[in-house]
C-alpha cells in the first residue's frame, strides 16, 4: 500500500509509522512526506530515511490573493503524482476543502488527540486536561477518522481511551497520549493495509 504522510511539525507519529514499516509490522510504503512548514522536523526524519519530501507552503497563495481551494487543488495534484492508496494526516495543521478531499475519496485519514465528538480543533490535549481538573471528564483519548471538510469529524476508523489520573501533570498526561497515538496510527494503517490487500487479491 502506497502511503503519503502530511505533517506540519515534529513528526513523532510519522516516526512511529516509519519504525513499524522498518521492523515489518506494517505492510506499507511511505512514498512521500509533505509539509506546509519548512521548519517541520518531520521533514528531516523523512529525509534521513531516504523518503521523498515536499514542502508546500500556503503563504505564496495568500500573497498572490489565491484561494485556499486553489492551494488545496494544486496540493492534490502534487500528492497525486505519488499515486497514493492512502493519505495520512499526522499533525497536519490545515483544514482541507473538498478541492483536496474529493480527489481522494475515502483515502484521507486524520489523527486527532481526542475522543470522537470531543475537543475538536487545536489544543485538544490541554483542553481535556483542564476539563478533567474541572471534574467534567475522567478520560480523554485518540481517534483516527476519515477526513471530511468539517474539522476532526468524519467516520471513525479506530479510537482508544486514555485516562487522566488525579496525580497527573499535563506533561505526564501528554506523554501518555502521544504513546497511545503512536500505537493507534500504526494499528489504523495496518487495518487499512489488510483491507487494501484483500480488495487487491479479489
Ligand atoms: C499529534 O498529537 C496529533 O494527534 C496532532 O498533532 C500532533 C502531531 O505530533 N494532530 P507529531 O508532529 O506527529 O509529533
Image (spheres, rainbow, N blue to C red):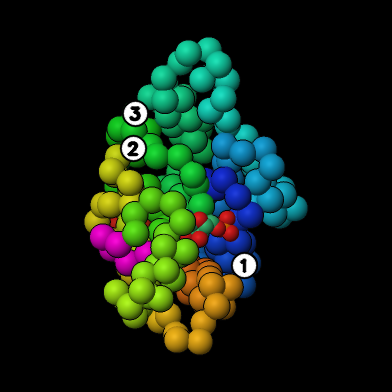
**CA neighbours of label 2 inside 10 A, class few (<14), some (14 to 19), many (20+):** some
Extent of the magenta region: 114-118
User: Which secondary structure dominates the residues rendered in magenta?
Assistant: loop
Quarter of the picture containing the C terminus is bottom left
Q: Secondary structure at mark 3?
A: helix
User: Disc 2 designates what residue?
Assistant: 101
Query: Residue 48 versus residue 118: which sits nearer the camera?
Result: 118
* Left or right: 31 as drawn, with respect to 47: left
User: Disc 3 designates what residue?
Assistant: 99
- The span from disc 3 to disc 2 (Cα, nearest Å) is 6 Å
**CA neighbours of label 3 inside 10 A, class few (<14), some (14 to 19), many (20+):** some
User: Disc 1 designates what residue?
Assistant: 19
Q: Please name the residue shown 65% across and 51% down the image.
A: 42
117 within the magenta span:
yes
Nearest to viewer (mark 2 / mark 1): 2
Residue 195 image label: none
- The span from disc 1 to disc 3 (Cα, nearest Å) is 32 Å
Q: Are marks 3 and 2 in contact (CB under 8 Å)?
A: yes
- In the current view of this chain or complex, which residue is farthest to the top? 64
Residue 141: where, in percent of width, then height? 38, 71
Nearest to viewer (mark 1 / mark 3): 3
Amino acid at each position: 500500500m502506497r502511503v503519503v504522510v502530511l505533517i506540519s511539525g515534529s513528526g513523532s507519529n510519522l516516526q512511529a509509522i516509519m519504525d513499524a514499516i522498518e521492523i515489518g509490522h506494517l505492510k506499507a510504503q511511505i512514498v512521500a512526506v509533505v509539509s506546509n512548514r519548512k521548519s517541520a522536523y518531520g521533514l528531516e526524519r523523512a529525509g534521513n530515511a531516504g523518503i521523498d519530501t515536499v514542502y508546500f507552503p500556503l503563504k505564496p497563495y495568500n500573497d498572490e490573493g489565491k484561494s485556499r481551494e486553489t492551494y488545496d487543488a494544486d496540493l492534490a495534484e502534487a500528492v497525486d503524482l505519488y499515486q497514493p492508496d492512502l493519505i495520512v494526516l499526522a499533525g497536519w495543521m490545515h483544514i482541507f476543502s473538498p478541492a483536496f478531499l474529493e480527489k481522494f475519496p475515502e483515502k484521507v485519514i486524520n489523527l486527532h488527540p481526542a475522543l470522537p465528538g470531543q475537543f475538536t480543533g487545536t489544543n485538544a490535549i490541554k483542553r481535556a486536561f483542564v476539563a478533567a481538573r474541572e471534574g467534567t471528564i475522567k478520560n480523554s483519548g485518540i481517534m483516527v477518522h476519515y477526513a471530511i471538510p468539517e474539522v476532526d469529524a468524519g467516520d471513525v476508523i479506530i479510537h482508544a481511551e486514555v485516562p487522566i489520573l488525579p496525580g497527573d501533570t499535563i506533561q505526564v498526561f501528554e506523554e501518555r497520549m502521544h504513546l497511545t497515538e503512536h500505537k493507534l496510527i500504526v494499528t489504523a494503517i495496518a487495518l487499512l493495509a489488510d483491507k487494501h490487500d484483500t480488495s487487491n487479491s479479489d
